[in-house]
Amino acid sequence: MKLTKYYYLVIAGLLIISCKNNNENDLAINDGETSSIEDKVSVLLSKMTLEEKIGQMNQYNGFWDVTGPVPENGDQAKKYDHLRKGYVGSMLNVRGVKEVMAVQKIAVEETRLGIPLIIGFDVIHGYETLSPIPIAESASWDLEAIKKSAQIAAKEAAAAGINWTFAPMVDISRDARWGRVMEGAGEDTYLGSKIGVARIKGFQGDDLTTPFSIAACAKHFAAYGFAEAGRDYNTADIGTSTLNNVIFPPFKAAKEAGVRTFMNSFNELNGIPATGDKYLQRDILKEKWKFDGFVVSDWGSISEMIAHGFAKDGKHAAELAANAGSDMDMESYLYVEELAGLVNEGKVDIKYIDDAVSRILRVKFELGLFDDPYRYLDEAREKEVIGSQEIHDAALDMAKKSIVLLKNENNILPLKKDGQKIALIGALASDKTSPLGSWRIAAKDSTAVSVLEGLKQYSGNTITYAKGADVSIGKTEFAFEVKINTTDKSEFNQAIKVAKQADVVVMVLGEHGFQSGEGRSRTELGLPGVQQELLEAIYKVNKNIVLVLNNGRPLTINWADDNIPAIVEAWQLGTQTGNAVAQVLYGDYNPSGKLPMTFPRHVGQVPIYYNYKSTGRPTLPGEDVVFWSHYQDEENTPLYTFGHGLSYTTFKYSNLKIDNTFSKNKTVKISVDLTNTGKRQGKEVVQLYIRDVFASVTRPVKELKGFELVALNPNETKTIELILSEDELGFYNNQGAFIVEDGDFEVFVGGSSQTELADKFKL
Ligand code: BGC
């Protein structure tokens, strides 16, 4: 015991001596025998003034060219002054070792207590080297690969001085009009929860103190993906059952996986803006789920509560947000301006401030920032890691795994590698920026391998390229508002000429990379601009078309599905796009992706999702009966269902068995045989769905409750076992209690949500 005490005193002494700065920080955090993080947090808290505490709750966007001259006037000067006083706890969008070093040094060496900043950034699908957009990665259903992708992103971002990402977005969304579906894992709660957890584990690693891992952030709490009519930032009005069973579970899973931060959301939910919602942030997240990290507001979302009609003015907004449990103010400037006054007036209890600050400090300690605030700041590492081969290899691996083969008639794919005349058509085929997708702040323009470059490298075929038509007009690189070409067809003829002479036409069509993402909602889901006309014009002269889609959301492509023999969903695959597409088109990689979101036939069907509820009139009762739940002018079914995706080989499902030992050990074991009946090695995502046939709160017609990615050689059979436990069999009732009810369950297994085998059991 004595030895331990002596040891700590020596270490504390050494730390104090080795630190050249003259602030009080070292005394504050190395006081006595403060071995646990909790002790350190409370010692530090006890030394902080009210203003310093509130400073920790204040986050500023990178506010000046920090390695340049110090700002003298205006807002930037004010922010700089706040930083020097210790009134800034975090910054976002400061990146690169030099830049981060400049602000971190001020925080650590010039402020009274020297508390390091936590540096946030939207590392959504990579930092400078980009992996596929998140919805694409989700199509892999490959949790290990997704984890690895996040790990690699963390490594690259951390090398640039970042220690906190605003990801993963775990918002479930059923509305393809919403531009941010590109940033999530799609429509399903079960899959979304698993993917969210994989991403968190990838970002955070096993040890947050290594300079290769960063803190993650589950966002946007809550219901942001249910924006009415798919219009971003719009109101969400949601029943209890959907909130508890669809929206909350991925957030709860994130908490259980140890995510260190949450972000609240822009939307109001049932009349309360999420940022000012005590029920969400205090009652559910912090009390019921016992989350001990911190909650950051979304950008300006505290002040936006005025426009929502919830707060009278900025001061009122700060009061509402702090009382509701928003711990850190991202860019509203309201905590730093108003909170001290509110505490002094007794409108915000100091216990809420102490709680928020403790949470923020806790995460900073966990990141090891107090041990070495410069641990992320190593220029040699920055040089070595960013854009390294390891990172590109991982991005390529993820990109191949994200591709979904939607249709492949007459085995037009894979393409032959030699002796073919290939016409490559579409502006997106040669684009080196759009495939990077939305959320690519640190990636440089024109750094993606285009499909044109990829295809050329992979074969001895003759490839003739014709653009056909631009997708967007004007400046597109880093253009926030993309203008779509709806008129210019002047290059159609050249493309038609090229197509006429080809054995196979590969057309790369779809959305520009900036047509999805934040603020980019659409009312139409077809191919943008003149691309549909281009497709039809080429089809008239050559029907041998492989359509490669680039998009950040499900599209309505009925005509293509009716007419085009092969359709490949290639999303926006990031830096390695062209290589991944080429490997799949030539069959060097056998696709195994499955859709994480339903593709509608018509935008009027949206929101359309596989796990809908039955109505009282679900099926056509008889010829010419109009009174059942349907549309007059379109089928109820989707074009491509959730979980759909083909392979260059074929699979057969057989021998579905249910071993119901629920009464003994609370599990039901489902087993099924999967056989590769084709001629190639391939992977299949075996999907298990259940239906709780009747329940005290109605359950969906089908719910994904298990899956496994299985690799098989030709003629090989494997028996796959999937376990249903209480977690999978139960649901939340309208009082928020998780219950498992007796009764009949149906089980469905197959390679998509339109499953192949079915059986039943009773609980
Ligand atoms: C987005 C967040 C993002 C934040 C910081 C907001 O507009 O909604 O998801 O993390 O900006 O860039």
Image (cartoon, grey):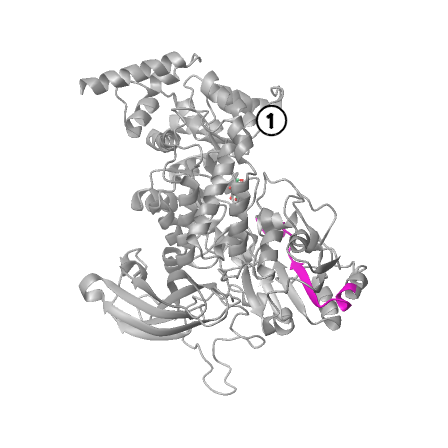
514 drawn magenta: yes
| Vertical side of 284 occupied by 52: above or below | above
Which of 690 and 263 lies nearest the eye of the viewer? 690
Q: Is residue 298 above or below residue 425?
A: above
Question: Residue lying furthest bottom in this view?
Answer: 623
> Looking at the rendering, which quadrant does residue 403 occupy?
bottom right
Residue sitting nearer the eye, 327 or 434: 434
Q: Position of residue 642 (x, y in %)?
A: 48, 65
Residue 52 sits in which quadrant? top left
Point out the image quarter for the C terminus: bottom left
**Any part of residue 170 in sight:** no
* Residue 170 x/y as whole percent: 45, 50
Q: Is 138 in front, or is 458?
A: 458
Instruction: Say whether residue 67 is left or right of residue 706.
Output: right
The image position of residue 192, as x and y in percent, is 43, 55
Which residue does the image show at 48% across and 57% down from the upper left? 140
- Whether the magenta-drawn stretch holds residue 291 is answered as no
Ligand 1 within 8 A of label 1's CB? no
Give the magenta part as a residue range: 498-517
> What secondary structure is marked by label 1?
loop
Residue for point 51% across, 56% down: 401
Q: Which residue is mark 1?
A: 64
The reply, left or right, for residue 761 in relation to residue 503 is left
User: In which quadrant will I find the N terminus?
Assistant: top left
Label 1: few (<14), some (14–19) or many (≥20) C-alpha neighbours in 10 Å:
some
- The residue under label 1 is which amino acid type? Trp
Q: Residue at x 47, y 87 (%)?
A: 622
